Amino acid sequence: MTETGKAQESSGGPIEKVADIGRDIGEYIRVQRSNAKISLRQLSKLAGVSNPYLSQIERGVRKPSAEILQQIAKGLRISAEALYVQAGILDLPTGGPVGDSIRADTELSERQKQVLLDVYESFRRENQAAHPTAENHAQPEQNTPTAEKE
């Protein structure tokens, strides 16, 4: 068991990744809080999390659990999924390059991103209904990716 510990210490990989995730989620929460124009104290009340603990999360000192992230998401009025993705708990949802671009845009609020994604998906569903042979998720076609590059 000590060999495993030494291997992790010498590579620093897993430990560094956890530290990076903690800093990343903290920074993301701080940006979302700032965009929502909510003080740290206000968010701590809305989320039901102590002010010092929330401050430690934002500074990357603590890595919050999924449960705490859900409470913070409610306080910020953003999707818990967005925080889970930032924290490395969930993988980024699939949806092609347009969806990925919308989700990655740091200048949009979570609500704006969700509205854009909803509109985009509604257009895609409408087009699929009008032209069911063009792209059918039940029967993937090999030619579809070349059509999507345009």
Image (tube, helix red, strand yellow):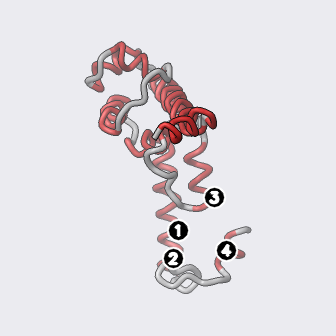
| Vertical position of residue 129 compared to residue 63: above or below | below
Disc 3 marks which amino acid? Answer: Pro
Report crowding for label 4: few under 14, some 14 to 19, many 20 or more residues within 10 A (C-alpha): few
Whether residues under marks 1 and 2 lie with C-beta atoms below 8 angstroms apart, the answer is yes
Residue at horizontal 45%, vertical 20%?
A: 37
First of labels 4, 3 by sequence position:
3
Residue 103 in the image: state x and y as whole percent. 55, 47
Disc 1 marks which amino acid? Answer: Arg
73 relative to 93 in the view: left or right = left
Residue at horizontal 60%, vertical 34%?
A: 12
First of labels 4, 1 by sequence position:
1
The residue where tag 2 is placed is 128
Whether residues under marks 2 and 4 lie with C-beta atoms below 8 angstroms apart, the answer is no
Q: For residue 80, which quarter of the picture?
A: top left
Residue 149 in the image: state x and y as whole percent. 72, 68
Residue 124's tag is 1
Who is closer to the viewer here, 139 or 52? 52
Which quadrant of the rendered structure holds the C terminus? bottom right
| Vertical position of residue 135 compared to residue 115: above or below | below
Residue 107's tag is none
The residue where tag 4 is placed is 145
First of labels 2, 4 by sequence position:
2
- Of labels 2 and 4, the one closer to you: 4
User: Most extreme residue toward the left, as rendered?
Assistant: 48
